[in-house]
Amino acid sequence: MESHEAVKRPRVLVTRQTPGESLQRLREVCEVEVWPETMPPSREELCRLVKGRHGLLTMLSDRIDGEMMEIAGDQLAVISNYAVGFNNIDVDAAKTRGIAVGNTPDVLTDATADLAVALLFAASRHVLPAGNQVREGEWKTWEPTGWLGVEPAGKTLGIVGMGRIGRATARRLVGGWGMNLLYTSRSDQAEVEKELGGRRVELDTLLAESDFVSVHVALTDETRNLIDAEAISKMKSTSVLVNTARGEIVDQDALVEALENRSIFGAGLDVTTPEPLSAEHPLVKSAHCVILPHIGSATHTSRNAMAEIAVDNLIAGLSGRPLRCSVT
Ligand SMILES: NC(=O)c1ccc[n+]([C@@H]2O[C@H](COP(=O)([O-])OP(=O)(O)OC[C@H]3O[C@@H](n4cnc5c(N)ncnc54)[C@H](O)[C@@H]3O)[C@@H](O)[C@H]2O)c1
Ligand SMILES: O=C(O)[C@H](O)CO
């Protein structure tokens, strides 16, 4: 039986075309099949495609659970996710089978933090509905009471999950707009506090005291629905919620209700449940919510760099070496 030891021309599946030239490096050492469609393979198609592969280069939309690993076979040595988040992969199941799992941290931190800030401003200043008024020919006059928004300067920013992107977002808003910082974290972040000031607090305190709340925790069983109805009810009526992490962290029904009742001012989301969210969904229809199609890392620089790391991870895993960025 073929097992994890290095084979001459390993068989690799790449579940979507990635930008840049990095797949060329993979082709030099592997037999590579790239899923050619824009839409991801269905579960059924993926089950068929993974069979007999030594390595998988996967997207966040591919659910790679124990069953999928079983179907792939004992030779599967490495799963390289083209994302920093890896909630789509059952990491415990991979560990049990001795399969290495990699992700693409750091290189997308600035792009994603930039987008969190963009969403914060878009939701605070009605950027999309006001812009649509112009596009639709409905702009009648300058109005003293039209499109009134809220301002971040000197207000309190609450970062839920002070990891890489949380810190980069805080850096922009504390440094640029003089915001005061509160954050949640599983441990004190002395370095962050030295750089940016700020205070680690319980989530309830953060929600009650922040004017802008930006979510940056990884999606885990612990953080699923972290921002639920009770959490949202603690937020100020003038506050803005931003989520660039994962849709499942925020209870969307509760958010719809809060926006309809005007119990918070607005929301900016780069991630939803499901993705894509139907155009009929009340959050998409809400004038108080800005939704983007999960584009946090979508810059040439970030996506190219992610591809390089994903390929490095895959090649390392196939030859039994430690991954450049490992989550196992
Ligand atoms: N919108 C996008 O395109 C996009 C781009 C990149 C990352 N992301 C998402 O952002 C997430 C964060 O990325 P990162 O690079 O900052 O990761 P990271 O690991 O540096 O940060 C996550 C932080 O969350 C903290 N955390 C986890 N569980 C927690 C809990 N229960 N309470 C408080 N803190 C908790 C971790 O300790 C860590 O500090 C990713 O997991 C991914 O889901 C989205
Ligand atoms: O987790 C990630 O990396 C993002 O969601 C996509 O870049």
Image (cartoon, helix red, strand yellow):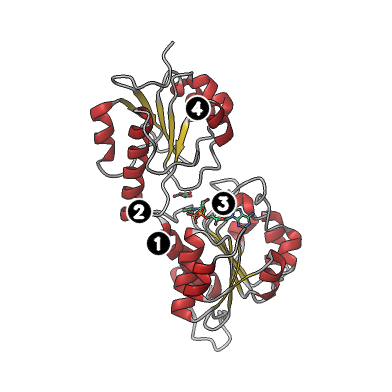
User: Viewed as shown, does residue 202 lie left or right of 58?
Assistant: right
Mark 3 or 4: the one toward you: 4
Residue furthest out toward the front: 190
84 in relation to 173, above or below: above
Amino acid type at image mark 2: Ser
Query: For residue 110, which numbered disc appears in the image?
Result: 1
Packing grade of label 1 (10 A; few <14, some 14-19, many >=20) is some
Mark 3 or 2: the one toward you: 3
Q: CA distance from mark 1 to mark 2?
A: 9 Å
Amino acid type at image mark 1: Asp
Residue drawn 35% across and 56% down? 299
33 in relation to 186, above or below: above
Judging by the rendered image, the residue that carries numbered circle 3 is 218
Q: CA distance from mark 2 to mark 4?
A: 29 Å
Judging by the rendered image, the residue that carries numbered circle 4 is 98
Where residue 20 appears, as percent x and y from the top left, is: 27, 44
Q: Viewer-proximal residue, 122 or 184? A: 184
Amino acid type at image mark 4: Gly
60 in relation to 73, above or below: below
Amino acid type at image mark 3: Ala
Judging by the rendered image, the residue that carries numbered circle 2 is 302
